[in-house]
């Protein structure tokens, strides 16, 4: 029977949801029982076999929870199948150790149990990669560098703390098999811990979207193994804490997930990882100088440092690109603030700035104020789209009739203005004004519907022998424009004016 189980963000069979929830609860029960046994310590009679059994059963149940997740839904199936298999092999290694190795007087350097336990690392690593690919569709490159920086720095700390203690003395006299046995587990834990912290960095240092329990479980497994390998924790602590790792992994299998289109890191998170890792690099190097030199830690911290340098370079490159985009945006905004949106011609602000430039030069200038005759009738008869087409055409024809350095602008509505620099006398001003008028009314203006309309303009022109304020110049030109309109339109009226 199927139903509406939605523990993983998609529809799953009801039986699958119930089985998964039951397995999580069972894992939690075993984990708390094992943790209680570890806390009671010596007061619990026996040689620790019962606690070892609880530990092994909790791993088996967590494996079943992950495999049930893989069976019941196709969402992230390969990843959970790999993680469930890794847990199963770990539990089988425990069973082999319990049934065979613990009966021996001394443990062999490598056994079938070690093969099962060591398979944990590549399987979990592959599962992490698959989950990251399925849950995040795009990761900025700076976060990839953060992942390398943080992962290698974490691995360097782990190596400095664990490998120096766990490494057999007199490396030169140790056999190759001894070195493999000595390095396999800490090396696997270093890689796993580095991958987990890298996933955190790539995910923007956030534990939502189904990552919290998974990260806690995998990081916990690496930390407790490191503490055990370096003799910082006893068998009883290992058997009591590992079931909590099993619980975290079982819970992560049945936690709702959310795909993230693109991770974005802003604010303090952009600099937290590089800053912290820089301190870690310094601490490991100081430890190498004043303490025991650990080649693994030195290599990892060197890689972290190089990645950190590259990360800083990317940061400066990103800042430079942001500056370029900001400057381009400011230039575009400035251009828009000086441009009429319909015609692309200068607006009042740009026209005023051009006029101020002429005034600073103290040169004579001409002002043309141009108005389309009977424009309201064009709008009423042909529509506003036709009116806009007429305005655009008038501006274009006016610009073609004057010099390149002259400024043609839209003063407002159907009214336009032209700034003519270095006009020697009134006759030249009138010739230019007539040229503008005839350029506009020489040919009919095409309209959007395919028809045409005849357009004429009235022009008021003034020559300012001593350039004064823009308001004075426009006012004088406006008087001439209205004189042209009163005189019958489609004509030029001009005058030479000077301030009082």
Image (cartoon, helix red, strand yellow):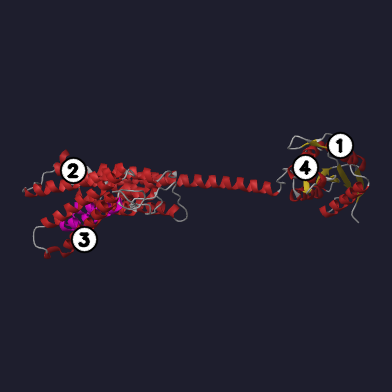
Say what secondary structure mark 2 lies in.
helix
Say what secondary structure mark 1 lies in.
helix
Q: State which tag comes first along the sequence, 3 or 4.
A: 3
Q: Is residue 271 left or right of residue 349?
A: left
Place of residue 330 in the rendered image (x, y in percent of width and height, measured from the top left):
63, 48
Q: Which residue is mark 2?
A: 116
Q: Nearer the viewer, mark 3 or mark 4?
A: 4
Say what secondary structure mark 4 lies in.
helix
> Is 490 situated above or below 25?
above
Q: State which tag comes first along the sequence, 1 or 2.
A: 2
For the residues marked 1 and 3, what is the alpha-carbon distance in whole angstroms? Answer: 96 Å
Q: Which residue is mark 4?
A: 382
Q: Which residue is mark 3?
A: 32
Residue 183 visible to an observer of this rendering: no
Q: State which tag comes first along the sequence, 4 or 1.
A: 4
Residue range of the region highlighted in magenta in the rendering = 224-253
Discs 4, 2 touching: Cβ within 8 Å:
no
Q: Is residue 326 left or right of residue 188?
A: right
Q: Is residue 298 left or right of residue 316?
A: left
Q: Is residue 247 magenta?
A: yes
Q: Residues within 10 Å of mark 2 (few under 14, many from 20)?
A: some
Q: Nearer the viewer, mark 1 or mark 2?
A: 1
Place of residue 147 in the rendered image (x, y in percent of width and height, measured from the top left):
37, 47
Residue 214 visible to an observer of this rendering: yes
């Amino acid at each position: 029977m199927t139903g509406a189980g939605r523990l993983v963000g998609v529809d799953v069979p009801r039986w699958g949801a119930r089985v998964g929830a039951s397995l999580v609860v069972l894992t939690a029960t075993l984990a708390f029982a094992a943790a209680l046994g570890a806390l009671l310590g010596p007061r619990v009679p026996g040689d620790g076999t019962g606690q070892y059994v609880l530990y092994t059963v909790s791993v088996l149940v967590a494996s079943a929870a992950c495999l049930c997740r893989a069976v019941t839904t196709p969402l992230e199936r390969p990843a959970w199948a790999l993680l469930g298999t890794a847990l199963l092999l770990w539990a089988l290694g425990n069973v082999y150790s319990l049934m065979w190795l613990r009966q021996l007087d001394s443990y062999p350097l490598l056994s079938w149990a070690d093969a099962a336990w060591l398979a944990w690392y590549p399987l979990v690593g592959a599962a992490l990669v698959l989950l990251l690919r399925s849950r995040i569709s795009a990761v900025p490159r700076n976060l990839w560098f953060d992942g390398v920086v943080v992962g290698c720095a974490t691995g360097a700390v782990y190596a400095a703390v664990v490998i120096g203690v766990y490494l057999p003395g007199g490396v030169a006299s140790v056999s190759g098999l001894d070195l493999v046995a000595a390095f396999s587990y800490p090396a696997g834990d270093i890689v796993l811990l580095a991958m987990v912290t890298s996933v955190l960095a790539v995910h923007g240092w956030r534990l939502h979207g189904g990552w919290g329990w998974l990260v806690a479980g995998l990081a916990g497994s690496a930390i407790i193994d490191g503490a055990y390998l370096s003799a910082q924790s006893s068998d009883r602590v290992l058997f009591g804490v590992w079931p909590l790792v099993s619980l975290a992994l079982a819970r992560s299998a049945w936690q709702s997930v959310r795909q993230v289109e693109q991770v974005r890191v802003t604010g303090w998170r952009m600099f937290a990882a590089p800053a912290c890792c820089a301190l870690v690099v310094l601490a490991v190097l100081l430890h190498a100088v004043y303490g025991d030199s650990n080649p693994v830690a030195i290599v990892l911290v060197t890689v972290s440092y190089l990645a950190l340098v590259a990360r800083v370079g990317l940061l400066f490159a990103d800042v430079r690109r942001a500056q370029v985009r900001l400057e381009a945006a400011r230039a575009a905004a400035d251009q828009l603030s000086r441009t009429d949106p319909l015609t692309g011609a200068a607006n009042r602000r740009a026209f005023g700035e051009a006029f101020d430039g002429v005034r600073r030069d103290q040169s004579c200038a001409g002002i043309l104020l141009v108005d389309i005759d009977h424009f309201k009738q064009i709008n009423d008869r042909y529509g506003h789209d036709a009116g806009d087409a007429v305005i655009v055409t008038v501006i274009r024809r006016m610009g073609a009739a004057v010099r390149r350095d002259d400024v043609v602008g839209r003063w407002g509505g159907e009214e336009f203005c032209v700034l003519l620099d270095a006009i020697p006398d009134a006759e030249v001003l009138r010739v230019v004004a007539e040229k503008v008028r005839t350029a506009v009314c020489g040919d009919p203006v095409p309209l959007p519907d395919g028809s045409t309309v005849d357009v004429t303009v009235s022009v008021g022109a003034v020559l300012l022998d001593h350039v004064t304020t823009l308001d004075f110049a426009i006012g004088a030109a406006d008087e001439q424009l209205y004189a042209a309109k009163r005189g019958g339109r489609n004509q030029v009226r001009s005058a030479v004016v000077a301030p009082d």
